[in-house]
Amino acid sequence: MNTFSSHRLSNTPKIRIFYRISLTSLIVFAIFVGLLVFQQFYYRYYETWINILIITISYGTSAFLIMWVALLFFYWYKSSRDYIVFLYFISMALIAFHLVFTALFIDAKLADNQYRVGEYVGGSGDTVQGKHLVLGNIYRISSIISFFSIWTTTAVMMHSYREKLIRSITYWILLVLPLGYFLITYFYQFFLSYMLVTSLHNDPVTVTIYLTVFLSLSKPIGGLIFAIAFWKMSKVVGYERNMKISMVIAGWGIFFIFSANQAATLIVVPYPPFGIATVTIMNVASYFSIRNL
């Protein structure tokens, strides 16, 4: 991994530009979130166009920064021919691709939904279900591929340090578990269909709550495992302080990217709009990923 330490760009003008872009988007987020809060306290409703703008800016900024990280890895690969660097290029490019189509899919669903969302009694639901099937399929497929790609890259990176890692078997188990968990959340109908039908009939509210928690935690748990791999690598390269700090920051960036990618919860237009605060962290996570390179 010497490639990373020999190509540090932390002090270049481009990084300062990325910092300004990230800071500007945060200021814009603060304005729009403030508008959402004002509408809910004063009018008892919020307008979905605000959510659309927040998602577009957040995911657009994040995709741009992550794509730049991918280009950096590609340039490094051309000079070093390190296959781990190439895998990171592929992973970052796929994550950026997924972020773009997440924004397109969620924005399209929100644009077709009701213009104003107010207080109501009962549960939320996707009122425009069945529309934008192509975007929805691309969104789901890109989610699986991007997750599997960064999982593979993390596994290969850990394998390259297998002689230096303590209790490497434990870390391999930790890698396999989130992958299995993530795949189950996408195909849970096949694994849990009979149990869900019976339980939903007996206690639909409780089952819905548990199912929502189960499905929403897969990405944060996967991001945490990927971050742990980076943090563990930081101890392996502890002899080089700058490299160690970079690995720690990159770990936090990866963790926040996967944890904050929760825009899909806004499809059901909940009141209040849960998920907006999480989405606004995306650009900070992306800046973490590029800041240490």
Image (cartoon, rainbow, N blue to C red):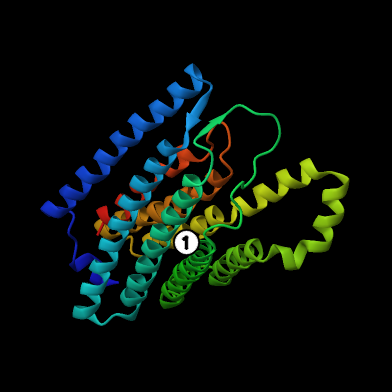
Amino acid at circle 1: Phe
Task: Please state which of residues 196 and 135 is positioned toward the viewer in this rendering.
Answer: 135
Residue 239, visible in the rendered structure: no
Residue 257, visible in the rendered structure: yes
Extreme residue in the top direction: 42
At x 58%, y 50%, the residue is 128
- Look at the numbered disc 1 and give the secondary structure of its residue: helix
Please indicate whether residue 10 sits to the left or right of residue 217 in the image: left
> Label 1: which residue?
226
Residue 111, how many percent across, how many down?
Answer: 46, 46
Task: Please state which of residues 165 and 89 is positioned toward the viewer in this rendering.
Answer: 89
Q: Is residue 230 above or below residue 34?
A: below
Residue 204, how many percent across, how many down?
Answer: 80, 44
At x 60%, y 51%, the residue is 216
Extreme residue in the left direction: 13
Dividing the picture into quadrants, the one containing residue 192 is bottom right
Dividing the picture into quadrants, the one containing residue 161 is bottom left
Quarter of the C terminus within the rendering: bottom left
Crowding at dot 1, Cα within 10 Å, few <14 / some 14-19 / many 20+, comes out as many
At x 25%, y 56%, the residue is 242
Task: Please state which of residues 225 and 50 is positioned toward the viewer in this rendering.
Answer: 50
Please indicate whether residue 10 sits to the left or right of residue 220 in the image: left
Task: Please state which of residues 78 and 101 is positioned toward the viewer in this rendering.
Answer: 101
Residue 67, how many percent across, how many down?
Answer: 29, 63
Q: Is residue 177 above or below residue 24?
A: below
Residue 14, how many percent across, how many down?
Answer: 15, 54
